[in-house]
Image: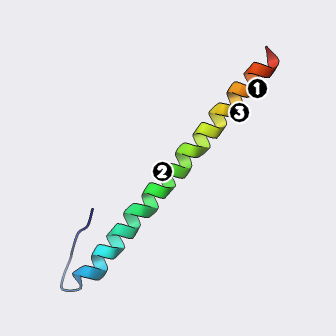
């Protein structure tokens, strides 16, 4: 999603693009961490049973 503001619209577009990519990367990392935690929980449950 891009938003252009003022006459330097290109720079602002790039900034918003990068911010969106960064937030997506953060969400992706958080999701991956949750998946790893869930997998670890499953494996420990399998070991104890």
Relative to 5, say whether 29 is above or below: above
> In the image, what residue occupies the spot 59% across and 39% down?
34
| 19 vs 12: above or below | above
**Label annotation for residue 8:** none
- Where residue 48 sits, quadrant-wise, is top right
The quadrant in which the N terminus is found is bottom left
- Total numbered labels placed on residues in the image: 3
Contact between marks 1 and 3 (CB within 8 A): the answer is yes
As helix, strand or loop, the secondary structure at mark 1 comes to: helix
Percent position of residue 33, x then y: 61, 44
Residue at the spot x=49%, y=57% of the render?
A: 25
Gap in angstroms between the C-alphas marked 2 and 1: 26 Å
Q: Give the Cα separation between the discs numbered 1 and 3.
A: 6 Å
Q: Which residue has dot 2 on it?
A: 27
Q: Residue drawn at (33%, 69%), measured in percent from left and top?
A: 16
User: Outermost residue toward the top?
Assistant: 49
Classify mark 3: helix, strand or loop.
helix
Residue at the disc numbered 1? 44
Residue placed farthest to the right in the image? 48
In the rendered image of this protein, does residue 27 appear above or below residue 2? Answer: above
Identify the mark nearer the N-term, 2 or 1: 2
Q: Position of residue 9 (x, y in %)?
A: 22, 80
Q: Are marks 2 and 1 in contact (CB under 8 Å)?
A: no
Q: In the shown orientation, is residue 43 left or right of residue 33? A: right
In this picture, residue 14 sits left or right of residue 5? right
Query: Hey, which residue is sitting farthest bottom in the picture?
Result: 7
Q: Which residue is identified by label 3?
A: 40
Label 2: few (<14), some (14–19) or many (≥20) C-alpha neighbours in 10 Å: few
Q: CA distance from mark 3 to mark 2?
A: 20 Å
Q: Work out whether 27 lies above or below 47.
A: below
């Amino acid at each position: 999603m891009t938003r252009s503001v003022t006459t330097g619209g290109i720079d602002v577009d790039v900034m918003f693009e990068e911010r969106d990519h960064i937030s997506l990367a953060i969400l992706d990392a958080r999701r991956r961490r949750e998946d790893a935690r869930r997998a670890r929980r499953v494996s420990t449950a399998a070991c104890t049973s």
